[in-house]
Image (tube, coloured by chain):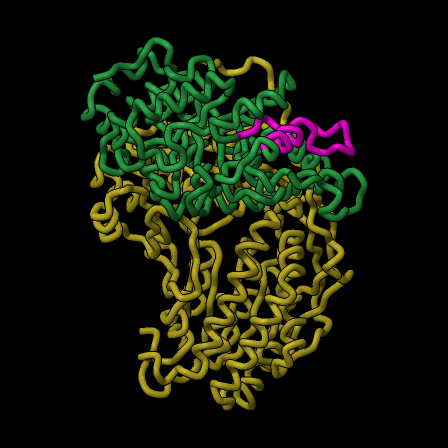
Amino acid sequence: MVKVPDTATPFFEYAPAPESRSIVDIKPSYGLFVDGEFVDGHGRSFKTISPSTEEVLAEVAEADEADVDLAVKAARRAYTRVWSRMPGSERAKYLFRIARIIQERGRELAVLESIDNGKPIKESRDVDVPTVAAHFFYYAGWADKLDHAGLGADPRPHGVAGQVIPWNFPLLMLAWKVAPALAAGNTVVLKPAETTPLTALLFAEICQQADLPPGVVNIVTGAGATGQAIVAHPDVDKVAFTGSTEVGKAIARTVAGTRKKVTLELGGKAANIVFDDAPVDQAVEGIVNGIFFNQGHVCCAGSRLLVQENVADEVLERLKRRMSTLRMGDPLDKNTDIGAINSGEQLKRIRELSEVGDAEGAERWEVACDLPTKGFWFPPTIFTGVSQAHRIAREEIFGPVLSVLTFRTPHEAVEKANNTPYGLSAGVWSDKGSRILWMANHLRAGVVWANTFNKFDPTSPFGGYKESGYGREGGLPGLAAYLKGADA
Amino acid sequence: MTTTSASTASAGVFDDITSSESSLRRFLHGLPGVDQVGADARAAALGTRSIKTTAKAFAIDLAIRMVDLTTLEGQDTPGKVRALASKAMRPDPADPTCPAAAAVCVYPDMVATAKQTLGDSGVNVAAVATAFPSGRAALDIKLADTRDAVEAGADEIDMVIDRGAFLAGRYQQVYDEIVAVREACGSAHLKVIFETGELQTYDNVRRASWLAMMAGGHFIKTSTGKVQPAATLPVTMIMLEAVRDFREMTGQMVGVKPAGGIRASKDAIKYLVMVNEVAGADWLDPDWFRFGASTLLNDLLMQRTKMQTGRYSGPDYFTLD
């Protein structure tokens, strides 16, 4: 029998296949999008950079309280005079138009998202942008059917929605917030994250292109203070936030005692649970997808791998082999699997928590690869020998770092999976249907994926238990959150 | 029960497993399951790799070297086979730097004709045997079919498994047949065809892969080309995972051959990406990976000329054989 060849076979080196940047036109500076126009802010400005090169992309206005006030006033005017009086079928036309423009300009949006955020083009192109369009299409369909949605007769919108979104899925989080709000008849003031404002500003252009009435969508850029000004503004009726649990708590405190409705989608420390009868090659894919998708900057990331002890060695061996085929680098290269960490600040946090992992005695393994000298990079990393008491098993790292724990029985798996202050998502890998259903019934997580991970669909509600927040986005519950009396 | 002969790959390693029908079944059904949705998604994701410039040139030349140029028709004549053999040795008459194909694949009665033309060119003759394509014949007829092809000079034998026996759960019978054909092959290499379009589930493909590898097949092959669907990316991926895991366990390599339905260079490149990332770079060699194809070769040649000249030339600039 022929043996394994001794000589090394010539390596199949994939030549760079970069997506062209020429499709996007980044302006040197951007104002705020208020009342259908781009206007200068009263405050200072800040720079947004490309995390893969640290190149400055643009100067962006930082909205102060006065700017936010103007935006809220514009939204209120648009609400009372135009949007709340418009028949749902007419609102739907605008949303369908926006959805189609997003599809038409999909490549431009994908390239810009990858430049500003650092995520690989294959993700922005194949996941983010198509899902964004799908969300607008989905909620456009609801706009003229609110009376028949099972949410009571003639459900009414809240009014002005103040929305603050994170940097991990800049355009997708915008779609999750804006599409249902507009379909239900609300107008919005939205603040994108300070490190990733550009696709939201391009979305503002799309609103102009779609002839959306002025003031229905207002986009104010800025940092935490701008977000605070939106949340605290007395004329905002509904607050929707996606981001860290820490900021979510502050928002909850701010709106406590007011009439404002709130939905919060916060952090997570999801368990990805692999049983010994799992389809092992697909489970390994699911582990990789669960924690390394979007550099692990995913609130529902499967950051804790719970693997049954009797197959742990085999699963880890396969996982390491699979990780060594991941390609890290230029986000615009179509063959890149792992892009750049979104910011220096986030990179610092990932490094700090990883060092804590070392110090607490967990064993670190990372893919050996050369990191680019410029930009923010962190190699895909796993920690084995992690116990529930370790900080890396409890705190959200929000990076490409996986903590591996083992369990012996389904009961122990559930106990460990639920033993976290969070409860956003979980994954179960098993060929046994009855066990999957049993697990899903006992896991306290908003989403439980079976034999898959990180699958999103506009028709499926998404949200968390405990410190992962409250309220649901997506599906009918996501619509109800923007209608009076319907979100109870 | 027949035990593995000393000449087969698995001598010793799998004796306990292959010693009885029940132990064989226990082993095959104990293999990790395949989740179809996940496997399809992974195969599709690998298909999105963008292979350009130097990588594309490398892939196209490699793919040409991996082609088993095939004609398996009732209407095959010596003239047709000679033409195909000439094409295999020199795919692009206009370009001497173009590599030769791996083999010519014909029915057993055409082996001598093919061998005569190919001589010692290095291009092998592969013969389909064992009552190809259905495999519905008695074992002694299959073995005679095999010996006939080997005696005529076949370097490689492409056998079909008994899908009826496999689907009925008679794994021992399938195993014993492969072992017997392997013995009848002598020094010729054995490729074992599963006809995955008839096995249908990925779990079956994985089980058939292990069965054939334990029985000593040198290659595992998806299809005869006579049943739809023939080769697909996910099925080939399941087989690549199997040969990878088999090497982990035994240290021995088994080749993989998707056959049927691969017509475009773009598709062939997707397969090579999959070989590279699932089984590993060691399999990127005609000794370990083949394409069973006929029309694919001309598309590869057209792409090759395009890479070199920057221009597409018409199909009339490439030979039809």
Residue B42: within the magenta? no
Picture residue at 69% right of the left edge, 77% below the top? A37
Which image quarter holds the N terminus of chain B? top left
Front residue of B267 and A240: B267
Residue B142 location in percent, x, y? 35, 25
Please provide percent x and percent y for residue B150: 46, 18
Question: In the image, is residue B83 part of the stretch drawn in magenta?
Answer: yes
Depth check: give the residue in front, B156 or B74.
Answer: B74
- Please report the residue visible at 25 percent of the width from the left and 47 percent of the height from the top: A436
Q: A427 and A58: which one is in front? A: A427
Q: Is residue A414 left or right of residue B78?
A: left
- At x 54% / y 53%, what residue is drawn? A168
Rendering colour (chain B) = green
Magenta segment, which residues? B81-105
On the image, the x and y values in percent for residue A39 come to: 72, 74
Q: Looking at the image, is A2 positioned above or below residue B127? A: above
Residue B96: in sight, yes or no? yes
In the picture, which chain is yellow?
A
Residue A133: where, in percent of width, then height? 54, 66
